[in-house]
Amino acid sequence: EVLRASGPRLRYDELKEEVEEAYEVRMDKIMLHKALWDCTKTTFSEDAVRSKVYTALARTYQPALEECVADARPRSEVQVVEQFTKRWIVSTMDRAWTSVENPQHVFTDRKVASLFQKLIAPYGETSPFSCIPGDIIEKVRRPPSDWGYVHAVVEELFARWEQESLMPRASSKKRKARKGAAPGGEDAVPEDPAMEALPPPAATKASRHARDESPASSASSLGTDEAEETDCDGGPAAKASRHSYHESHAGAPCVDRAEEGGRDGGGGAATVPRCPRDEARFGVPCDGGIAAKVLRRSEEPRAHASDRVKAEET
């Protein structure tokens, strides 16, 4: 039947390119899931908590990316990275907070900041792989693992949680219904995490080289949460790291102009720092370049999309 098929024959080089691209996508997915689980396991000690946090990370990843690239507002490349990072942190922790017993004793600002800093370079600083999607850091270097912006987002998130804890009990229940965890049983860690359907970050030359390196450096680079907590207060060092990353791409001193509207814990880019020559250097991504590439690579249907619908209806 194959021999009798009509139509133009596929050239060898075209077939090879298609196979290599499919392989890269598959390997990126496996590396992403492994990184999510390894970083979660080194941050939290209880299996139940690990399961909830891992599931929250995996299921909020693609929605955060889609929301980020769909935003048509003028932004620099660095601001796109910051917007995705903030949305992913907020979505993940809001979901995990409502699915874990006694979350106020489980989650601390240091542990949460440590988790997401590990995800920036899960296989070590020498490996170019990152859980931040390759499409949005393709033109800028990966943020440092001690990126101060993570501290800023986490501090803002915990401040919001503290305010909500002081609200009347009814308001707290409404928030839990709106942000609640998935129905029982769905938060279990899959037997093979890499097999769960999750569109991966785009394959890049950096990630291809990363897979050729020995994964032995992963364990040493992740370390333990106790080691990571030594400098997680978001102090002057963290702020300097945040500004350093921003200025290295903007070419001018960073000037924070946080807008009040961005402090509601949402996924907007209002609270990201802006630099005078940012847009002049990077331009405005209004041609759909980033969005087009990301959406083209999201060929697999997103698993458990009904979870979000059920949560919203509740």
Image (spheres, helix red, strand yellow):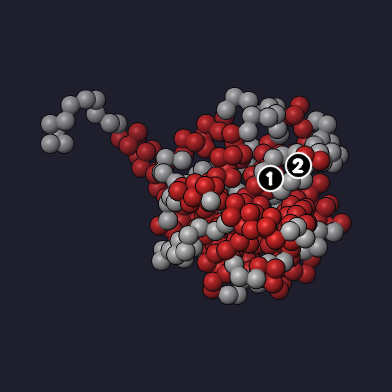
Amino acid at the residue labelled 2: Gly
Q: Taking the image as drawn, is residue 116 in sight? A: no
Q: Are marks 1 and 2 in contact (CB under 8 Å)?
A: yes
Residue assigned mark 2: 262
Q: Secondary structure at mark 1?
A: loop
* Quadrant in which residue 15 is drawn: top left
Q: Amino acid at mark 1?
A: Gly
Q: Which residue sits at x=71%, y=48%?
A: 265
Measured in 3D between alpha carbons, the distance from the residue under mark 1 to the one under mark 2, in whole angstroms, is 7 Å
Side of 312 relative to 121 (left or right): left
Name the residue at 84% across, 38% down.
Answer: 257
Residue at image position (52%, 37%) is 294
Q: Determine the secondary structure under disc 2.
A: helix
Is residue 96 visible in the rendered structure shown here?
Answer: yes
**Percent x, y for residue 113?**
71, 60
**Residue 4: horizontal and vertical position, in percent?**
12, 31
Q: From the image, which quarter does the N terminus lie in?
A: top left
Residue ID at (71%, 34%): 76
- How many marks can you see? 2
Asked whether, in this view, residue 216 is left or right of residue 25, the answer is right
Mark number for residue 213?
Answer: none
The quadrant where residue 151 appears: bottom right
Q: Which residue is mark 1?
A: 266
Whole-percent x and y of residue 174?
63, 54
**Residue 152, image x, y percentages:** 77, 53
257, 121: nearer the viewer = 257
> Crowding at label 1, few (<14), some or many (≥20) Cα neighbours within 10 Å?
some
